[in-house]
Amino acid sequence: MNSETSPDDVKVSGLFFYPVKSCGGISIAKATLETTGLAHDREWMLVDTRHNPARFLTQREHPELATVGLTLHLATGELTLSRAGAAPLTVARPTDRSKLLRVKVWSAEVFGIDAGDAAAQWFAALLGGSAAQVRLVYFHREYPRFCNTKYAGDVGATTYFADGYPVLVTNQASLDDLNRRANRSAERALPMNRFRPNVVLSGLPAWDEDHIDTLTVGSSLLKLVKPCVRCEITTTDQATGSRLSDEPLNTLARFRNNPDLGGVTFGWNAIVLNAGELAVNQPASVEYRF
């Protein structure tokens, strides 16, 4: 690990979590960072039971999921779903182990607890198909999901239903540079929510995240382990669910293609070495790789 001096004005400028994978995000001022990521991040997921194991559903094939608003009731663990044209629905956190489903996220097979028919019917009305096919599940914590040791190492890093790692870190200056390269004015600038980060940093030079080894925020310690390869979700307007262009993928392809990973990258996946508390405007320090 390199001891190169961290920029003095680095801070956390945004915190976000996504209770249901691929549905709407929630911006927060403070967050608890657990070893699995920000508390309550991607604990729920939609699956298609026509596959065995049931296969995860995301905005890749269903961009309309972006329009699903979420309210998490911390005292009860209940989740309220909302969207235009439908009555809100509050779903209890399931605990019935007889409702376990084996589910698949990319190559990882884990268990989720089915959240019941009302939630399935609500999402089936949005996505099409039947309530028997579209199910909402809650991550069963007794069966941990380990991160790929090729990148995470042997520290035993785990996550819930995220694509692969506990935390996604992005850099505001990198987004500003991306918008400049795409010739987008302030009025047309792509917002950070296209990239669905957990932690947004400001005060770093553009693309400096490519060289960061660890990020310290208070007592929390994150290790950046793998660039995040981006897909068509970044072309989806997170307010409307529409896809009106191939940006930012076209611009990223001009200067952010990573042949070793098979795509263009923006942001970094991180694992949690020390849990703690995070807050917007909290100072952060970085250490760089050699």
Image (cartoon, grey):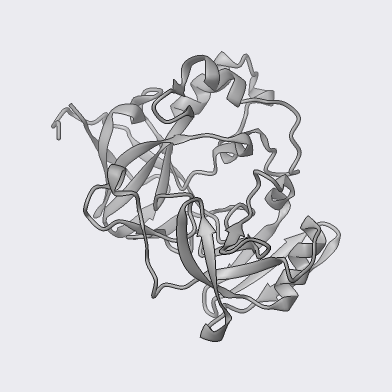
Q: Position of residue 51 (x, y in %)?
A: 63, 61
Vertical placement of residue 116 versus 270, above or below? below
Q: Position of residue 119 (x, y in %)?
A: 71, 72
Decide if residue 223 is in sight here: no
| Front residue of this view, candidates 278 and 227 | 227
Q: Is residue 66 left or right of residue 203?
A: right
User: Farthest right residue?
Assistant: 85
Disc tally is: 0
Q: Position of residue 194 (x, y in %)?
A: 60, 37
Q: Is residue 265 left or right of residue 20?
A: left
Residue drawn at the location 77% of the way across and 56% of the way down:
127
| Front residue of this view, candidates 139 and 174 | 139
Residue drawn at the location 48% of the way across and 16% of the way down:
255
Decide if residue 136 is in sight here: yes
Vertical placement of residue 14 versus 101, above or below? above
Vertical placement of residue 141 versus 129, above or below? below
